[in-house]
Amino acid sequence: MMAAGIRSPPAPRSDAPSPRPTFDTDLLRAYIKKLLQTTLQTAAWPEPRERDRVKAWMKEIGERVKERMLEIEPRGFKYIVMTQINENLGQGGRADMVCHWEDSDAVAQEIYSNTSIICICVAFAVRTI
């Protein structure tokens, strides 16, 4: 028989939602910044017959950013990486993207430019579960 006022602690609720992991955008942003600098520091806008080099740079950057995203958070997110390289004719460049889906979704963006090219890289991490 239990004494009045003494009770067992309540059992922990197993159906309580656990905090959703978030994606570390600061870590990714630093990686993208360094990647763009090292990949494109000596890059120059190619002649028309050599434009496949621009496609190769964009593909390499996109794949390496995606690989890094998988290293940072291998499960629970879908990844989207957009890379754009344009000739720098003094026009400047800007990229502004924002996620408005869930609090755990994230976006990281970086711009690199030299006297010949402008590169914009935007990476999204969208929570799947």
Image (spheres, rainbow, N blue to C red):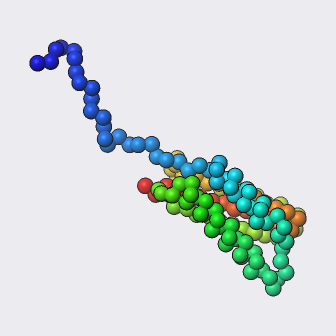
Residue found farthest to the left: 1
Q: Quadrant of residue 82?
A: bottom right
- Give the camera-side residue of 104 and 12: 12
Horizontal side of residue 61 vs 92, given as left or right: left
For the point 64% across and 54% down, the residue is 28
The quadrant the C terminus occupies is: bottom left
For the point 49% across and 47% down, the residue is 21
x and y percentages locating residue 5 in the rendered image: 22, 15
Q: Quadrant of residue 117?
A: bottom right
For the point 30% across and 35% down, the residue is 12
Up the image or down, 6 lies above or below 84; here it is above
x and y percentages locating residue 33 in the rendered image: 73, 56
Up the image or down, 88 lies above or below 103; here it is below
x and y percentages locating residue 105 in the rendered image: 54, 52
Residue found farthest to the top: 4
x and y percentages locating residue 44 in the rendered image: 85, 71
Q: Quadrant of residue 65?
A: bottom right
- Give the camera-side residue of 118 and 8: 8
Q: Is residue 95 visible?
A: no
For the point 30% across and 37% down, the residue is 13
Horizontal side of residue 94 vs 9, given as left or right: right
